[in-house]
Image: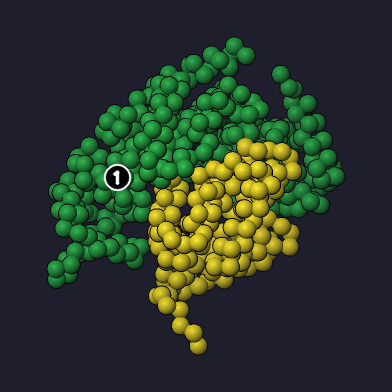
Chain colours: A yellow, B green
Amino acid sequence: MKPIDVDARRYAWCRGHALWIVGMPTHIFLEDIQGAQRAGQDGLLRYAARMIGDACAVALNVALNYERPIPSAAMRSSWALERLQGHELWQPCWELIRGTEASADEVVARCERLVDRVCVIVGEMPNILTPEGHYPAIAMARDWIKLMDAVGEKAPLPYNWTLPT
Amino acid sequence: MVSEAERREDLLARVERFHGVSFEQVLGEIEYLRDAGDSVIAGGSLAYGFGNHLSDLDLLVAGPTTVESSPVPLEHFVGSLRVDVWKFAQGLIEETFDRAEEALASESPLLGSFGDLHHEDELKLLHRIAFGVLLDGEGLEPAGERDYCSLASGLVVREYAERMRASALLAQLALRADRPIAAVVNARLAVEEALNAAVVRRGLPFSGDKWLRERLANQTADLASVYKPFRQLPENPARDAPRFVEEAVAVCTEKWALDLDIDALVPAARWRNTDLQVMEVGTDRLLLSARFGALWSLNESEVETWHRLVSVGAVEPDATWDLGECDAEALILCLRLHEHGLLGLHWTNGVALGNLEGMRSVGHEADRR
């Protein structure tokens, strides 16, 4: 048996939030940059890349440092980056948040690399945007909601998505 | 001026081209959701003419006798096309417009009350009604003399003006608190919010923040040059944040003729406590949020600052206090707590549309075109 070195409530809250922050928005934004790349929509591509940098920094901070609560969207980049100082993924997150002027292909590659590396730390979430990932994602959300309910924490998703009322 | 029929044709051609999916297939997929008299209205980026092959199709099913509403989108797949469907009784939509009308007439802040940054569902719903493409059915007849477009636009302009005000304040506070990344992030947000409001003010439908740069490039080219210096944050925020923030605030002020200087904004802003309290444990002074299970150690100076905040009533859970009552140290401590999600920022008043001088100038530009 392997102990988890943090109390159950904090683990469930932080890991659950980290997974959903990475699992839902980053899939959406990755899809946005892929669509934007093919359509030549540079503005959309760079906005989505920025959001991926932000989401990855926040998810990492929550998952690695068990920081809570998560601040407002306007403040969470600086909050996350401060606590990630010295981590190897600080620089890739900051470059995307800052707004890179690299080529579209390079931006896409950087985003995909960063999300892959963050998922290794935070965990994989099925892509809710795809037919094959939709129901597995809902099922995983249900599992997290059950864990959070069990430890007395509120889940980060609408309960009516996943649990019968 | 593009006609309703042309917009519909353009949307259907786009869906056909991207996905090889016909209008009949889409309608067939969602037919089970329609009650007698329901119309199908398309909104979102595909309907507004800039979505790409991976964009989903946002549909609203609504009518005067709709039986059951679903504010949570119901996801469908027709081939490779993802179709998100919201279902609303028209009565519920009119209630949202009623609230929009009241909110616009009120002096209270609007900020976030029709959806926050990540969940702008109600703002988007109103724009789908006002600017959407009718795909099937009779459409919705507004209640009374109601002007859907004007209300939906006014609401977004007001919302974004208030967001801009908050971002401008946070950028300047963050500078004072020596938080350069927070300062530049908020400065750029303020500019984007100013421009988003300007785009909608020109009669274009609201499509969320992610499409702003596309719309600047393709629909409002004169505003694209305003944005250019802010697309990328400074490489060295610790060195360049003061200049970046100053220039961002200047641009927002010029666009909307609001005084966004920190001294002008502070009197209208309030902090709100969560449940922070200082606990004395021996010689240790610990700042505790039991709600979030969070604990910090405070140094002597921070403890003194906290005690001064207590004297203005800050200690009770959910208590609010004016930023104007905070001295320099207290403002910095509060900004840091806000950055940790432990203090909320609230406003005593909204930004009334009549105060937005920029409304007139931006509107005139639109009229001239």
Q: Is residue B369 visible?
A: yes
Protein chain holding label 1: B
Judge from the rendering whether residue B229 lies leftward or rightward of residue B296; answer left or right.
right
Residue type pointed to by label 1? Ala
- Percent x, y of residue B217: 63, 29
Q: Splitting the image into 4 quarters, where does residue B283 fall?
A: bottom left
Judge from the rendering whether residue B21 lies leftward or rightward of residue A118; answer left or right.
right
Q: Splitting the image into 4 quarters, where does residue A140 fall?
A: bottom right
- Count numbered badges in the picture: 1
- The quadrant of the image that shows the C terminus of chain B is top right
Q: Residue at x 33, y 54 (%)?
A: B342
- Density class for disc 1 (Cα within 10 Å; few <14, some 14-19, many ≥20) is some
The kind of secondary structure element at disc 1 is loop
- Percent x, y of residue A158: 54, 58
Q: Is residue B151 visible?
A: no
Q: Quick check: B218 above or below A142?
A: above
Q: Which residue is mark 1?
A: B177
Q: Residue at x 54, y 66 (%)?
A: A122
